[in-house]
Amino acid sequence: MTAPPERRQGFGMAAPGRPAPQQDGRAEEAGGRSADPAGQRFAQGQGQGSRSAEPEQDSSAERQIDLLPEDATVNLAAERKAAGIDELLDALDRELVGLAPIKLRIQEIAALLLVDQVRERFGLAATRPSLHMCFTGAPGTGKTTVAMRMAELLHRVGYLERGHLVAVTRDDLVGQYVGHTAPKTKEVLKRAMGGVLFIDEAYYLYRADNERDYGQESIEILLQVMENQRDKIVVVLAGYKDRMDEFFASNPGMSSRIAHHLDFPEYSLDELADIAQLMLSEVRYRLSEDAEATLREYLSRRMQQPRFANARSVRNALERARLRHANRLLSEPDRAWNRDDLMRLESADLLASRVFSEPTSESPAS
Amino acid sequence: MRITQGTFSYLPDFTDEEIAQQAQYAIDNGWPLSVEFTDDPHPRNNYWDMWGLPMFDLTDAAGVLYEVNECRKAYPNHYIKLNAYDARYGRQTTALSFLVNRPEVEPGFRLERQEGPGRVVRFTTYPYALDKPKGDRYGS
Ligand SMILES: Nc1ncnc2c1ncn2[C@@H]1O[C@H](COP(=O)(O)OP(=O)(O)O)[C@@H](O)[C@H]1O
Ligand SMILES: [Mg+2]
C-alpha cells in the first residue's frame, strides 16, 4: 500500500477551506443524520452554546431526552421488534441448522443488551458488558458465519457503531522484521473499529518454541486495545478447541479478557443432511428421493475420511454434484429438459464421487 | 495568541466527539485521513511531520481518534492536525484539514519591519516559538 506521492509532506493549512457539507451532492443525503456534524453547526449558528437545544442523534443527548419516569412500564417484546432483533434471531434460527447452544447464547446476549438499553432509559446505571469472544470448533462448523451474524446483531442493539466484520489470520497481524508488527496490528485494529475483529486460528499468534517471535508483540497490542477500546471493538478468536486451550494456558491475559467461550459441536449426520437441503433450496435445487438416500450414504462415508470439514464439505460436495448435473444434461443434446429436470439432482450426480470408490483415501474427495 | 488554521479555524476547538464526527464524514465520503504534527506555528510552514501513514480502508472514526490520541500522547505540546484527502480524479487534493491539538501556551508572533530605500517598509511575522530549536519550543 503506498500513499499518493504528494502526501509525503504536510499540506500545510493552505488547503481549501471550504466546509465539508458543501462539497458535493452527497452532503444532502447525510443531512438528517449525525454523519453531518458540520451541517448541524451551520444550522445552529457558530456558537457551541446553542447546540444542546437541537435534537441530535448523539446518544448522550438521547439519554437525557428519553429518561422515563419511575412508574413507567416498557414492553420488551415491542422494543425487541423495533430494534430489528427478532428478525435477526429468526433468520439465524432458519438459516443455521442445529447449533442450539450457540443460538441460545446469542439470544441471551441480545436480551442482556436490550435490557441494558431499557434500564438506561430509566436512569439505571448499566455497565457495558465486555463481549470479546472465543469460538472453538472443527472447520466448517459455522464459526465465521456466526461471527458475521453476531456483528450485525451487536450493531442492531446499539453495542457496535457499524457492525462490519474484519476477518484476519496471523499473517495480517504479525510482521516479518523488527518494527513491522506494531503498525500492522494497529492498522488491522483500526480497520475493525466499530465492528468485529475475527482472528482465525488465533493460536498461531503465539509460538511456544520461540520467545522472540513477533506474534507476542501483536498479542500485547491486541490486549491493550481489547481493554482500552472495549466500546469500539469486539474481538473474536477462533480455532480448534484443544489448541485454543493451550493458547489460553500460555496467555492468561488473553483468557481473562474473553467473556464468552462458545464451543461449536461437530454436526450429526441428520444435521449435515438438513444443511445440504438448506443449501440446495437457497440456490433452487432439490434432491430426488434416490439422491436423498445417496447423499446420506455419501455423508456418512465422508465423515469417516480425513480432512472432513463439516458444513463446508457439504457445500463442496453439492457444488460438484451441480457440475455433474449440468454435464449430464448437456450430454444428451437431443432431449428436452423441463424446469424440474433443471432443479433436480439425481443419485448419479453424487455416486460419481471418489468418496464412494476409495473410502479411506488420503486424497481429497472429489 | 490562539493560532487558527484550516477548515474550521473560525470555530472553537473541537471536542473529541466533534473530531470523530468530522472524521466519520470524511470516511463516509471515501477520503482517507492522516495525522500530522509540528512545533513550527508559522502559517507558511507546509512541512508538517506525518504521524504514520494515511489511514485507508477504515469504516469507523474510532480508528482515527485512536491515532490522534497516540500522537497527542507522544507530542502533547505540539500542533496536531487531521487531513482528509480526496483522491478522486478531478479533485486530488486535501478536502478537509483542521487542528486537533495545540500547545498549552502559544506565545504568538513578532512583527518585524525592515526599512528599505525611500519610505519602503517590509513586514515579516516571526513566531516567538522559533527562537528555540525544534522539539524544545513549547516546553516538551
Ligand atoms: N449450521 C449451519 N447451517 C447451515 N449452513 C452452515 C452451518 N454451519 C456452517 N454452514 C455453512 O458452512 C460453510 C462453512 O462455515 P464457516 O462459518 O466458514 O465455518 P468455520 O468458520 O467454522 O470454518 C459456510 O458456507 C456456512 O454457510
Ligand atoms: Mg472460518
Image (cartoon, coloured by chain):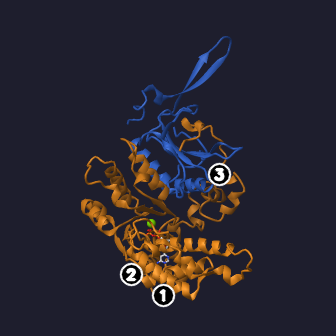
Q: The residue under label 2 is which amino acid type?
A: Pro
Residue at 46% of width from left, 49% of height from top? B67
Point out the tag, 3 or 1, that comes first from the N-terminus. 3
Observer-nearest residue: B81 or A73? B81
Q: Residue furthest top?
A: B117
Q: Where is residue A231 in the image (x, y as percent from the top left)?
A: 43, 64
Marks 1/2 in contact by CB < 8 Å: the verdict is no
Residue under disc 2 on the same chain as residue under disc 3: yes
What's the distance in space between the residues labelled 3 and 1, CA to CA? Answer: 43 Å
Residue under disc 1 on the same chain as residue under disc 2: yes
Label number found at residue A20: 3
Is B104 placed left or right of B59 in the picture? left
Q: In this view, does A85 lie above or below A246?
A: below
Point out the tag, 1 or 2, that comes first from the N-terminus. 1
Q: The residue under label 1 is which amino acid type?
A: Thr
Colour of chain B as rendered = blue
Provide the secondary structure element on which disc 1 rests: loop
Provide the secondary structure element on which disc 2 rests: helix
The chain in orange: A
Label number found at residue A327: none
Q: Which chain carries label 1?
A: A
- Asked whether the viewer can see residue A303, the reply is yes
What's the distance in space between the residues labelled 1 and 2, CA to CA? Answer: 31 Å
Q: In which quarter of the image is residue A253?
A: bottom left
Q: Quadrant of residue A344?
A: bottom right
Residue annotated with mark 2: A101
Q: Where is residue A291 in the image (x, y as percent from the top left)?
A: 55, 84
What's the distance in space between the residues labelled 2 and 3, CA to CA? Answer: 48 Å
Q: In this view, does A78 lie above or below A159?
A: below
Q: Is residue B133 above or below residue A68?
A: above
Q: Where is residue B26 in the image (x, y as percent from the top left)?
A: 60, 53
